Image (cartoon, rainbow, N blue to C red):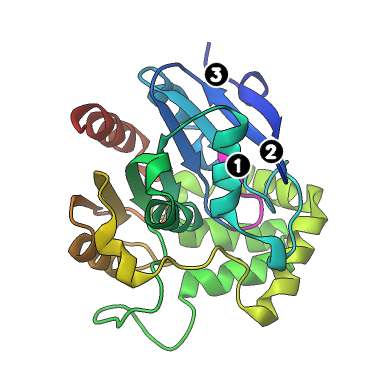
Amino acid sequence: MPLTQAEAARTVQTKDWKLRYYEAGEGRPVVLLHGSGPGATGWSNFAGNIEALAEHFHVYAVDMPGWGESDAATVDRLDHVEAAVQFLDALGIGKAAFVGNSMGGQTSIRLATEHPDRITHLVTMGPPVGPVTSLFAPGGGPSEGLKVLIETYRDPSPDNMRRLVEIMCFDTARFATPELCQARSDAALARPEHLRNYVDGLPKGAPLPVWANPALLPRIQVPTLLIHGRDDRVVPFETSLHLLAAVPDSRLVLLNRCGHWAMIEHADEFNRLVTDFLRGTA
């Protein structure tokens, strides 16, 4: 029988946070970090990946502070790198591979620069990488996808959620289903404090973990796999080209017919890429 959300769900109290996470498998620890957006959780981002990766690794998909069933967090307390380190400490994990989508990739990159002793491998999918000069992507403010994301935080109705899910995917007919849009709307509305804290943080800048210091990117020494959708309308693939140029031991897989959710739209290929990468590098 397929692994269910209820079977995988766990809760841990760290130094500062009560965190929900989803656990499966055994062996080398692999931490999956979700992206931002109303209704985003470790399970909603990685339901199609946890069981497949757990055939080879000990997998932990975490709801970060301010998302899912984890503690709420105002923008002034939002430090996902510190939360990730506390999560490792609470479970007695010395170091782990980190796999992060969007905001989760941003957190994983920063963790690799600030806590290199706690990470063995880095995998990112569409992470924002900070203020860089763009050659190919539209300029002049937030991307089309980020604008819709912020609008949906302000009003996470099923209609707005559908707009958000559609802009995250390339194949909207297959992935932007009414069931998914309703489920994410329900999840967002179930924790109004998460919505309120995010929106309240917008005048101070979108309440996301701060960018990694670009000057420190060349110091990342762990094997790094960058996966990006060619059709990403939230974070353009150019950001992963910047990472590829900056991180010494890195490689990039650019997927056509793929939006911001590579792990969802191309789950089988994503699972194979990550498994082969983690098993094939020191």
Distance from disc 1 to disc 2, alpha carbons, whole Å, reads: 6 Å
Instruction: Give the dominant element type of the magenta stretch: helix, strand or loop.
Output: loop
Q: In which quarter of the image is the C terminus?
A: top left
Residue 97 image position (x, y, % from top left): 38, 37
Between 89 and 202, the residue placed more toward the observer is 89
Q: Neighbour class for label 1 at 10 Å: few (<14), some, many (≥20)?
A: some
Magenta stretch in the rendered image: 37-43
Q: Quadrant of residue 17?
A: top right
Q: Where is residue 268 in the image (x, y as percent from the top left)?
A: 32, 32
**From this viewpoint, is residue 240 visible?**
no
Rendering coords of residue 15 (x, y %)? 70, 42
SS at badge 3:
loop
Dot 1 or dot 2: first in sequence order is: 2
* Residue that carries the numbered disc 2 in the rendered image: 14
Frontmost residue, 123 versus 134 = 123
Position of residue 55 relative to residue 22, above or below, is above
Are the residues tagged 1 and 2 within 8 Å (C-beta)? yes
Instruction: Classify residue 258 as left or right of residue 176.
Output: left
Q: Is residue 183 left or right of residue 145?
A: right
Q: Which residue is drawn at 25% across and 68% down?
A: 242
Question: Which residue position holds label 3?
Answer: 3
Query: Dot 1 lies on which element?
Result: helix
Q: What residue type is labelled 3?
A: Leu
Q: Which amino acid does label 2 sit on?
A: Thr
- The nearer-to-camera label among 3 and 2 is 2
Instruction: Give above or below for 241 relative to 277.
Output: below
- Of 226 and 48, the residue lying toward us: 226
